[in-house]
Image (cartoon, coloured by chain):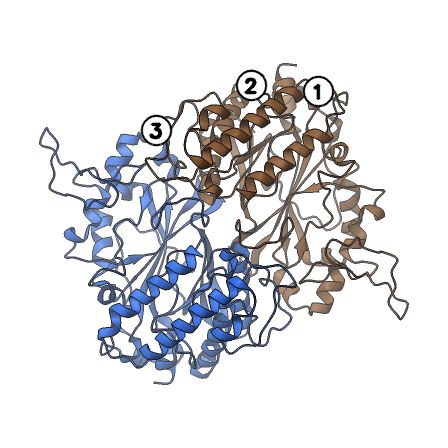
Chain colours: A brown, B blue
Amino acid sequence: MSAKTTSEKARKESTAMSSDQPHPQLSRRRLLGAAGAGGAAGLALGAGGYALAGPGPKQSTAAVTPATALGSSAVPFHGAHQAGIVEPMQSTLHATAFDLSPGIGRPGLTALMKRWSAAAAAMAEGRTPPGLTDDQVALDAGPSSLTVTFGFGASVFAKAGLAAQLPGELAALPPFPEDRIDRARSDGDLWLQVCADDPLVAFHAMRTLQRLAAGQAAPRWQMTGFSRAPGATARPVTGRNLMGQIDGTNNPKPSDADFASRVFVPSGGRPAWMAGGSYAVFRRIRMLLDDWDQQSLTVQERTVGRRKASGAPLSGGTEATPVDLARQNADGSLAVPGDAHVRVAAPASNQGAAMLRRGYSYHDGLRPDGAPDAGLLFICFQSDPGTGFVPVQRKLARGDALSRFLVHESSGLYAIPGGAPADGYVGQALLEG
Amino acid sequence: MSAKTTSEKARKESTAMSSDQPHPQLSRRRLLGAAGAGGAAGLALGAGGYALAGPGPKQSTAAVTPATALGSSAVPFHGAHQAGIVEPMQSTLHATAFDLSPGIGRPGLTALMKRWSAAAAAMAEGRTPPGLTDDQVALDAGPSSLTVTFGFGASVFAKAGLAAQLPGELAALPPFPEDRIDRARSDGDLWLQVCADDPLVAFHAMRTLQRLAAGQAAPRWQMTGFSRAPGATARPVTGRNLMGQIDGTNNPKPSDADFASRVFVPSGGRPAWMAGGSYAVFRRIRMLLDDWDQQSLTVQERTVGRRKASGAPLSGGTEATPVDLARQNADGSLAVPGDAHVRVAAPASNQGAAMLRRGYSYHDGLRPDGAPDAGLLFICFQSDPGTGFVPVQRKLARGDALSRFLVHESSGLYAIPGGAPADGYVGQALLEG
């Protein structure tokens, strides 16, 4: 039950961090959080917890297969913020962009967001989505910490007659040097991040949401990512990417004093419907692994600025030790080289810019040239991409030693609305505003 | 440690089943199996167990991250049979075919098989492969039940000057009705099945083996598959495929009296170098999920012949109940329809033909037409494909209701040599014969 406990803790801390902002959903969020925790605990003990966590019908999965702690772990769908942002990463990701079908408009989008929210809430509790009573695929694993996170791309606002509500933050990302963006695998009216600790649960949830959109929105692109298997390593938070480097050490933590303001739009911000929301940047970043693997360990570590095995910065200490950018070697050279990734990306090098990264590795076999089609599905959340991703990436693309081994192939920027209350749906403040 | 315990048990049972055949590797296998089990138990308790299991240097992973039971679970590489056949499926698969580089011949192939075997043996114990001392990628998870299984395609024999050793069993599979095979993603001189319970461990092992082949063999195609996350469901053996159906119920079990003779080539069989070996059939089978999902639960269950939720045959009982092909409904119709998959595929319908299936789901995003590029990486092992896969598939392709929802896109047939003794390598009996 450790995954569950950690998820709950992260969400509660996040809620606590933003509790200095008056927010109509907070009290409901707290109530719901408590109910969700009780419901999930009930799940681990048997099937009796479902009714606590949501309004859906009780269902017994015990007749099929008893639940495990991993499978029955649940992350509440409802809350001040959407799930899938502050929770520890699950092991499987499906990222999918949808385009609205012609003529759907605001009523169709509203109906879709209602249907999607109800389905996501049900599946997060291991229940069959409303209206799909014959759908029993995921029942023998439980929700496996399933989260579904919904986003709006800039292109959806005009299509839905909501151009006046388009946030300035969704202005197109600037072109970065060396970008090789395939627009057919970028952007999109709607964006869904589906994550779970079981690959079949995640696949089934993604497919179910796609089925529920039939006739109203069609997938534009779809990508699958993975992180470590639950329980494969005792490493608590950070993972390793396909280059073998520990990744995410400098991520903001829910316990940071400025965590909420960096990640979430405050109530009272603009536009008003984005209160409690965030902005997600998505980048498919291919790694030139054949080139990378030919570098010596020394070159790899100087490129990143950290030890490969431990993640400790080259300025000394352990993974958790802050990078000392000024530290010099005995010969007067910088311990962390001038173009090392950790130096160029460090908040201290970027006016304190920080974003919450939540990226997954991907591997789609071989490219036509025989090189691996593999790398990072980079995802980050921030309250303002103009002070988060954009300035950091601008600097990385120009001066980062690591960028020689990376190709940015897809790009997306999405407004992630705040979470839905128990009787609402994601995007309600926009669509009914 | 349940995965480990189960793996050990399966391999021991398999060894016991074949112990009525005199085999020079068996006594070493048994010794090694015991040492391997001791070594793995040592791993779970700390880092001290490595030296028990293999000749490599002791390495401490404790300084990086403490091992978990899942991560430290190990399957011995050496034995009478190759690993990755009788063990319970791990959660991640990389299937890769290689073609020999021009002019490599038998000496080059021999050197490659020695290098690959040494690397696979080391990584199966969580050690760095010989000669790659700076490679520390997988250290913080341990071997995670890694297995590497090597196969020879028909095309390698002439290239290596071994045409006289080509088994008759490697004659090309016959074309089946409705096959749509892409030969560029089929066949290959060599075939590697890499499986582990952690995706990064599996990816790293596959990449390491590819690096070690540089200049001697290049990847021809590469595919990635997944099964349930370890521990996500308490279901003991069978998994669910992407159609939602429980799959593998009728698989031969190591406890079956005829298991060894169905799966492994006996010593004394032909050719002699295949003693203890098997033949693997690989098929990439795309599922027409958009069509499938439009069928009612009733149609889906009659197509397969089993209940979707429980896997019980339509003739009654539970998943474990044998299918009663003769059973009739009250109206006199067959309980299991005449074209139901379980009927057409049943050993009773195919002169007792059986094969050990070990397939993985795959999902590679969207096809150009918007349909999911997803389905089954079918893998089966048998002592003779001419009495295993071929007659069953011939029948399925003509009369199976399920085949309307399947497209066979890739195909491969490989000779899987017997396992290597502790001082040998896979393929030694062929290459030094």
Q: Chain of mark 1?
A: A
Q: Is residue B315 visible?
A: yes
Is A186 left or right of B86, judged from the image as shown? right
Q: Quadrant of residue B388?
A: bottom left
Mark 2 or mark 1, which is nearer the start of the sequence?
A: 1
Task: Please tell me the numbered disc located at residue A110.
Answer: 2
Residue A287 versus residue B267 in the image, above or below: above
| Callout 1 amino acid | His
Q: In front of the other: label 3 or label 1?
A: 1
| Residue A217 visible in this rendered orientation of the protein | no
Which mark is on residue A23? Answer: 1
Q: Are marks 2 and 3 in contact (CB under 8 Å)?
A: no
Q: Which mark is residue A134?
A: 3
Residue B124 against residue A13 in the figure, above or below: below
Please give the chain letter of the residue carrying mark 2. A
Which residue occupies 19% across, 58% down? B353
Name the residue nearer the viewer: B125 or A174: B125
Local crowd at mark 1 within 10 Å, few (<14), some, or many (≥20)? some
Which circle, 2 or 3, is nearer the viewer?
3
Quadrant of res B64: bottom right
